[in-house]
Image: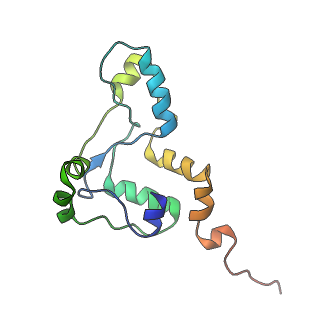
Amino acid sequence: MFQYVARGWLPLLGPPDAYFSTCNHDDAATAVVTALNLASGIYNVVDNEPMTHRQFGEVLAAIVGVPMPKTPPQWLVPLTGGLGETMARSLRISNAKLRQMGGWAPKYATSREGWAAVCQSSSIGAIMRPPHARGGGRKEQAS
């Protein structure tokens, strides 16, 4: 995802104001463990704050240090079939049932926190930082 954004593209289908929900992998794992001890049912595993595609692009662009990426054109959605049309839907999903019934809470309450942690905790962070932040920029000489 970081590499696409660094190249100027946000690989999300659908309009910029469409909502979607995400969850960090570690949070998803703890949610599954929590759900194993609950009554049968459907429990949504997402962070606490759905965001729009535009907001998500802004977050990733800020982390990577690039301008807001472009999104694929809307005419592309029907060409991607059922999966693409499903991905392009605007959905606000809540984790309230899992939080109330199981006491679960994500470590990363929002995508902003989760993606920043992913970037900082991996080699991706070093690759994606702008050259001046990596020390690869021009150095000034002392006078």
Using the image, determine if residue 52 lies above or below residue 22.
Answer: below
Residue at the image point whose x is 46% and y is 38% from the top:
109
Whether residue 108 is visible, yes or no, is: no
Quadrant placement of the N terminus = bottom left
Using the image, determine if residue 16 lies above or below residue 118.
Answer: below
Q: Give the image location of residue 84, x and y in percent.
A: 24, 52
Q: Is residue 83 left or right of residue 49?
A: left
Quadrant placement of the C terminus = bottom right
Q: Give the image location of residue 96, x and y in percent.
A: 34, 26
Q: Give the image location of residue 132, x and y in percent.
A: 64, 73
Residue projecting furthest to the right: 143
Q: Give the image location of residue 16, x and y in percent.
A: 27, 58
**In this orientation, which residue lies closer to the viewer: 102 or 26?**
26
Q: Based on the displayed image, in which of its 4 quarters is residue 67 positioned?
A: bottom left
Q: Is residue 25 left or right of residue 71?
A: right
Residue at the image point whose x is 62% and y is 49% from the top:
121
Residue at the image point whose x is 44% and y is 46% from the top:
111
Q: Is residue 22 left or right of residue 66?
A: left
Residue at the image point whose x is 44% and y is 25% from the top:
32
Using the image, determine if residue 27 lies above or below residue 18.
Answer: above
Using the image, determine if residue 37 lies above or below residue 85.
Answer: above
Whether residue 33 is visible, yes or no, is: yes
**In this orientation, which residue lies closer to the viewer: 109 or 3?**
3
